[in-house]
Image: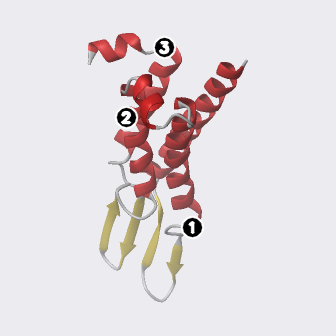
Amino acid sequence: MKIIWERLRAEDRILSATVVAVAVTLFLPWHSFAILSVAGTTDGFHSWGFLTVLGVLLLAFVLTSDESFFARHTPKVSIGAWRVVGAGLMFAGAALYLTVGPGSYHSTEVAAAYGPSYGVYLTFLIALAALLLTFRQGRRSVQ
């Protein structure tokens, strides 16, 4: 693990920190509900959160793999493109969960309410930062 960390550039270390942070936020409440006297939450491993999980796994694999692996197996796709795909999946999962996923509902006839919780908002912000960082890295490598 130390060898992998030492070969990462400073920008890749920051990107690694965002991947770890998003992985942690997957365990936070993404959705809360209260129906009658029953209340509960669900984490990021539901609904569109699976896109975020896939993005975390892909980006972690890309950051820990050697660049020659991607040159051998996907010669037409750069490692930067794989990073953008991973960060994009992380962001898309949280964004879709907020927009398409469980909305908010409140009824006056039945005491019920549900909607997004703080975990998905935190994931959204961190994944957005990771996506912007990958775009910045890609633009730098072209110049």
Asked if labels 3 and 1 touch by Cβ distance under 8 angstroms, the answer is no
Q: What secondary structure is marked by label 3?
A: loop
Check disc 2 and report the residue beneath it.
Answer: 61
Name of the residue lying farthest toward the right: 143
Q: State the residue at coordinates (38%, 71%).
A: 34
Check disc 3 and report the residue beneath it.
Answer: 9
Q: How is the image coloured?
A: secondary structure
Name of the residue lying farthest toward the bottom: 109
Does residue 50 lie above or below 135 as drawn? below
| Separation of residues labelled 3 and 2 (CA atoms) | 16 Å
Residue 51 percent across, percent down from the top left: 45, 54
Residue type (three-letter) at the residue carrying disc 3: Arg
| Separation of residues labelled 2 and 1 (CA atoms) | 28 Å
Check disc 1 and report the residue beneath it.
Answer: 100
Q: Which badge, 3 or 2, is on the more N-terminal residue? A: 3
Q: Which numbered circle lies on residue 63?
A: none
Residue 90 percent across, percent down from the top left: 49, 46
